[in-house]
Image (tube, helix red, strand yellow):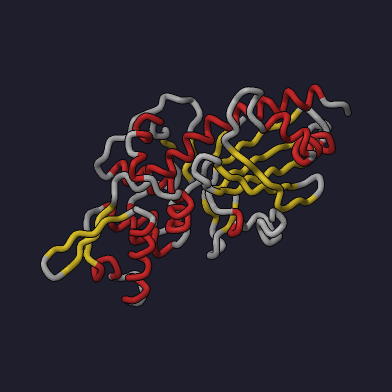
Amino acid sequence: MSWVGSGVWTAIAGRIADSGRPVVRSGDPARLLLAAWPIDAMATGLTASVSVDLLLAEQISACLSKRMHESEIFRALADPTRRAMLDRLTAGGRNATELRDGLGVSQPAVSQHIAVLRGAGLITERRDGRHVRYSIEPDGMTPLFDWLARYRAFWPEKVDRLKTLLKEMDQ
Amino acid sequence: MTADDDGETVDDIVVECELDAAPEKVWRALTVPEFVSAWLDPKLGDAKQQSYEMIDELPCSRVCYAWRDEQDGRESTVTFEIGPRPDGNTWFRLTHSPARPARAANCNSPALARAA
């Protein structure tokens, strides 16, 4: 049985982890394969394919007070522009103008993307003089890890039961 | 694998393996409610934590379930895909996407419309 998680959120999570927060290694032989970062991989220095262990469940559950719907996160990450913005923020806080710079999207569009990212709990804002500065919310991916950890444990057991059932079923 | 609005692949949990049974038999295990319940539902005495509802099927090829966590009501999408192997066994792939069923690109039917 193999586990393959190709992915946007896992890749971003890895980058968030790399940007300063320690990642607890699970030691589990099952690993997530992270697919190629879909945007500007060369420019951001991300390698085409990396594999990381998942966050441990205890690290995840410690942050559950900030629970968000993982589907909201999923939706937020489904957009390449928002991923690009998030990727920029992993390098440090930016204001809206800096976030928009070079992305080729309008200012209202950037505002909307920011709202979606904030709504999903992926970024936070802080007033900085006349500007608002945005940064990565380090625990923003926690609900997704929670979801992932739960179903990583869930499905292998179920598939084993499916195999058992198939043996017991009549042809 | 699902595709988002931009046609890019997005990420899911995927379990892929070979099953030691013919595709037709596997198909029944994945679609006949009694069989599905036998392997997917909690064992007797354990609390039920998930519910699921078939929302799309392509016989002997793919079946899609709207998945719901009872604890917090979160919805996601589970797709089982199968295919014949030369040795008579079945190739099996399970894809669990955190995307809500209504937006699942894997399923071409209006998601949950039949769940009412």
Which residue: 26% across, 39% down?
A21
Q: Quadrant of the C terminus of chain B?
A: bottom right
Measured from the top left, where is residue A73 in percent x and y?
A: 43, 53
**Frontmost residue, A131 versus A68:** A68
Q: Is residue A30 above or below residue B66?
A: above
**Frontmost residue, B14 versus A58:** A58
- Whether residue B104 is visible to the viewer of this picture, yes or no, is yes
Q: Is residue A135 above or below residue B16?
A: below
- Whether residue B108 is visible to the viewer of this picture, yes or no, is no
In this figure, what is the number of numbered marks?
Answer: 0
Which residue: 83% across, 26% down?
A169
Which residue: 60% across, 33% down?
B48
Q: Quadrant of residue B25?
A: top right
Q: Is residue A14 above or below residue B35?
A: below
* Residue sitting at the far right: A171
Measured from the top left, where is residue A83 in percent x and y?
A: 39, 58
Measured from the top left, where is residue B17 in percent x and y?
A: 67, 33
From the viewer's perspective, tell me whether residue B109 is left or right of residue A124: right
Measured from the top left, where is residue A116 in percent x and y?
A: 38, 62
Which residue: 52% across, 47% down?
B74
* Residue sitting at the far left: A129
Q: Quadrant of residue A119?
A: bottom left
